[in-house]
């Protein structure tokens, strides 16, 4: 256990407010153990009573979850104005959730008290006091989230302080200072937390913690969280992948990684930061929100290097070119192949793909030259590892694996009638594989889809492994756009066999032909990695 | 002009290092005026001499760009060890670019000097001094980017200082302190910039500026940039949409918006921050990298509220629920359950196109609903004014101008033979115009090109005006990418009649059908604006 620091995750509650996110109870039950594995101390599960799904979550969590690091927190609100806490069904639902921790949101900005809550400043303080007292008397640990704290402090510091004092005197173990609108800058956070602690006489031996809850509207959620910690907060809230309403909440992994790896503090239980990349990606799989490649620490690009200039130096001294060892957060360094790449980065990339090219100067020069030529004509390999590997294999062995030989293909798209009628697409592929000629016709909702279907169908008899493959992404980029539809087209295709995925590229003035190139590369790469040899 | 602050954009150089980004010269020529419109003072265009595309960019820029706020900067390196600056072809290429500003990257971390550059600390200082002197003598303004400055400073502060001094004494007008590996935290930036300025005796009246170049590896690029400015830097570098290698560079819009809107400083020329959202999105269209919804200030979700609890309070008192007025950055508050904002912007947009819709509540509601439905299914009207105008005309008059009636169309793409053989594309269009049936077949290097040729040819007899029209841009974006080639496709087409240009959009699961929709919209819009009536 970690007595000196609280890490409080609110992915399942505040994170779920993100536009387009819709977590089921099963999703939440699947995410909670991942947060626990990361080593957070608190998992805020939702608002039981107010949201029926969340009531179910706490019911199932009590039966099904076996958390080793974290405790569950139920989120709710202070009692209604002019009611007793014990008579407020919303407050009773928090007790009924059986969560050992209850987090109460309370107004601390006097303008919100008057204009949104429509009650008096004094009654709001009484609501805080009563609700905290009631819950602590019932044996719950209470966190008070002081909503709009920073905006409120800048308008009327005395009132926000009295809200904090009301909570603390009533027995709250944490008061979280919330930048609800997310607009603070670090220096403002530093100044306000410092002033507040001085005014309250808050110190390391105080019986309560001060916490920070930041949103990223000014692009400073991570920095604001750190600023609060440096000013004396010992409880930080955030979400996995920075999920949340508007621009999102503070990205908990970035906050924790900065504080643990750069400040030498210990925040997580069980050293979970080394698992952060895997956990962040696993959570994306469940939320079904594509991971953000540029996300600090855990993004797919976070330790990816493109510059040809530095590749040779990176090979010798990786620490000079990265702010931390990527393994500290479970991530990896990657070399990207691009027209800025030189022989050194091709060599590194080869090693990453399992080809030792050390000392093979002539081969390296040949590959580098070919990559540069191809990139000049529109190819890009930094997003198409699989096509690069095929190119490398071809240069090493002198040929491409001959899984099939294409005789011809054709695709037809047509529409009869004007607006409203639907177009149809079909494709025919003729190829030779396994000493036989295969002719097949596929339909689809577009020409590439139809070609994909026809190609698979033609190959299935000889290579049944191909049935496992599936297209998961298809991107088109028009280059040299000044030429209109005469422009060069680049197609990137991502495929999967259910466990790993790979990307291929095709380029040409004809979009369909470029797509065909990427489709066939994808099939060949998939077959090689399925351990198939040409039949 | 703004004598007190430099805003230096490096989207076209450092931003282009982003994984998956590959800007053509035409892309760069299209992005530069948008940066200029935003009001940055400097646009770093690339590395002439080292990258052939960048050499071309500066050539074309000199002929084609007419910038009102910004000057172009050419990026390059200090001279090679043991050469004269004037004899170094890389340095000469910087002069040849004709850019008035040259930004030199130089080592300031002594470990990089020894291990990556493999020269002596003294020779590195001489390289800085000589190259800056040579370029200033040739009449160039010089910015020195002190690479790995912060890491270097923490290892050996005296050496980093001597690199700064060498540049300043040789005539550099700015020395940019680079957090090249992006790992700094704001408090470290504050401390180092403050110490450095004290040691150098740098003040407001110094003849040179100190600048900041931040990367986002610790999630603090925006905060680090602001920390440097608060500590006395008066030059900030960054990129649009935070593009850049790994986790990206400092997001220039977020940095500037924080400093202008919250600190009351003036950074941009011409108040461009109010156009930031439109410009950031326009740049994404050119880079073809999907905008990030949660991006501070300009993201589609940045001011989106999941109504519910606070909806009525937000409507009455929006300022209590957002950190700034979204109009200050050209963004909009969105209530995810209300269409109030929509009607107002449709009315504004109509006015922009010459339709006064004041007081036409029912029409506005109808158009708003239709636009919302269409946008939900993948259309976008931000980048397709002409399609929006056709939609608006249709709602006002109840019909679309009947220039022609399509009977059917068909396109065939085929290839005989394997790799190496070329595919052919042809299209046949059958339509009725001017009381006659027209059947024509066009060829092209792809299906859309062939359809475009066939459509024009079928219409020319009745509408010879169409011969003036020309396609100048064609963009494809795949939406819902999880579905692979089953995904929805959005096509944007830009056309011109030689004097003005217009954009149309088509959407559908079938790429060819979506293209056809955009092609026909383009023809109709063009004919209307050529003053033609249906014949």
Image (cartoon, coloured by chain):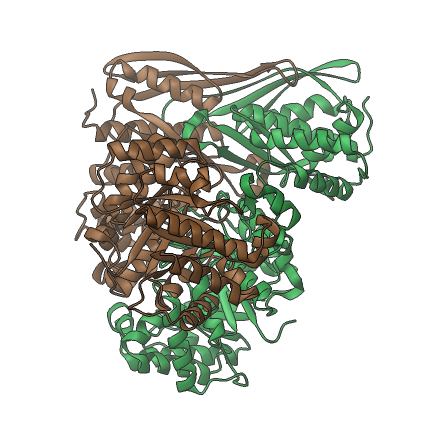
Chain colours: A brown, B green
x, y percentage for residue A139?
A: 30, 47
Q: Is residue B6 left or right of residue B341?
A: left
For the C terminus of chain A, which image quadrant?
top left
x, y percentage for residue A80?
A: 51, 45
x, y percentage for residue A388?
A: 30, 40
Residue B9 visible in the displayed image: no
Seen from the viewer's position, the closer of residues A439 and A155 is A155
Residue drawn at the location 36% of the way across and 55% of the way down: A172
x, y percentage for residue A363?
A: 23, 47
Residue drawn at the location 49% of the way across and 82% of the way down: B171
Residue drawn at the location 59% of the way across and 58% of the way down: B61
Q: Is residue A250 left or right of residue B154?
A: right
**Toward which corner of the image does residue A441 lie, by quadrant?**
top left
Q: Is residue A121 left or right of residue B484?
A: right
**Toward which corner of the image does residue A527 lie, by quadrant?**
top left
For the N terminus of chain A, which image quadrant?
bottom left
Seen from the viewer's position, the closer of residues B295 and B317 is B317
Image position of A290 with respect to B114: above or below: above
Seen from the viewer's position, the closer of residues B323 and B293 is B323
Image position of B524 with respect to A311: above or below: above
Image position of B271 with respect to B523: above or below: below
Image position of A503 with respect to B118: above or below: above
Q: How many marks?
A: 0
Seen from the viewer's position, the closer of residues A473 and A67 is A67
Residue A359 visible in the displayed image: yes
Residue drawn at the location 39% of the way across and 65% of the way down: A227
């Amino acid at each position: 256990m970690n007595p000196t620091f609280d890490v409080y995750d609110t992915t399942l509650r505040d994170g779920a407010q993100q536009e387009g996110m819709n977590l089921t109870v099963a999703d939440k039950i699947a995410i909670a153990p991942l947060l626990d594995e990361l080593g957070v101390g608190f998992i805020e599960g939702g608002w039981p009573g107010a949201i029926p799904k969340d009531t179910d979550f706490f019911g199932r969590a009590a039966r099904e979850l076996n958390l080793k690091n974290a405790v569950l927190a139920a989120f709710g609100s202070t009692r209604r104005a002019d009611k007793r806490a014990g008579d407020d069904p919303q407050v009773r639902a928090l007790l009924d959730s059986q969560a050992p921790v209850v987090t109460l949101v309370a107004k601390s900005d006097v303008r919100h008290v008057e204009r949104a809550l429509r009650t008096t400043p004094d009654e709001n303080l009484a609501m805080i006091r009563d609700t905290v007292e009631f819950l602590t008397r019932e044996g719950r640990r209470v966190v008070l989230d002081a909503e709009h704290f920073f905006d409120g402090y800048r308008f009327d510091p005395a009132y926000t302080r009295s809200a904090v004092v009301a909570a603390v005197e009533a027995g709250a173990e944490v008061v979280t200072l919330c930048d609800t609108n997310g607009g603070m800058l670090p220096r403002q956070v530093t100044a306000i937390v410092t002033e507040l602690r001085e005014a309250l006489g808050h110190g390391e031996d105080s019986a309560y913690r001060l916490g920070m809850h930041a949103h990223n509207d000014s692009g400073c959620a991570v920095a604001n969280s750190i600023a609060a910690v440096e000013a004396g907060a010992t409880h930080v809230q955030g979400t996995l992948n920075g999920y949340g309403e508007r621009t999102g909440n503070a990205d908990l992994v970035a906050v924790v990684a900065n504080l643990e790896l750069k400040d030498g503090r210990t925040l997580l239980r069980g050293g979970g930061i080394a698992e952060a990349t895997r956990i962040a990606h696993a959570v994306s799989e469940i939320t079904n929100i594509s991971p953000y490649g540029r996300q600090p620490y855990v993004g797919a690009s976070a330790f990816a290097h493109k510059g040809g200039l530095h590749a040779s130096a990176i090979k010798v001294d990786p620490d000079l070119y990265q702010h931390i060892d990527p393994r500290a957060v479970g991530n990896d360094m990657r070399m990207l192949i691009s027209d800025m790449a030189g022989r050194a980065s091709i060599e590194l990339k080869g090693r990453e793909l399992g080809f030792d090219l050390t000392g093979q100067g002539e081969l390296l020069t040949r590959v580098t030259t070919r990559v540069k030529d191809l990139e000049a004509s529109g190819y890009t390999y930094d997003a198409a590892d699989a096509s690069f590997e095929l190119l490398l294999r071809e240069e090493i062995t002198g040929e491409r694996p001959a899984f099939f030989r294409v005789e011809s293909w054709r695709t037809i798209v047509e529409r009869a009638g004007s607006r409203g009628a639907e177009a149809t697409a079909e494709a025919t592929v003729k190829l030779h594989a396994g000493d036989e000629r295969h002719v097949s016709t596929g339909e689809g909702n577009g020409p590439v889809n139809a070609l994909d279907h026809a190609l698979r169908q033609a190959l299935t008899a000889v290579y049944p492994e191909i049935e496992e493959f599936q297209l998961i992404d298809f991107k088109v980029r028009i280059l040299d756009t000044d030429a209109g539809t005469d422009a060069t087209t680049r197609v990137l295709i991502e495929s999967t066999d259910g466990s790993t995925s790979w990307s291929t590229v095709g380029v040409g003035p004809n979009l369909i032909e470029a797509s065909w190139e990427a489709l066939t590369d994808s099939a060949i790469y998939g077959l090689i990695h399925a351990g198939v040899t040409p039949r």
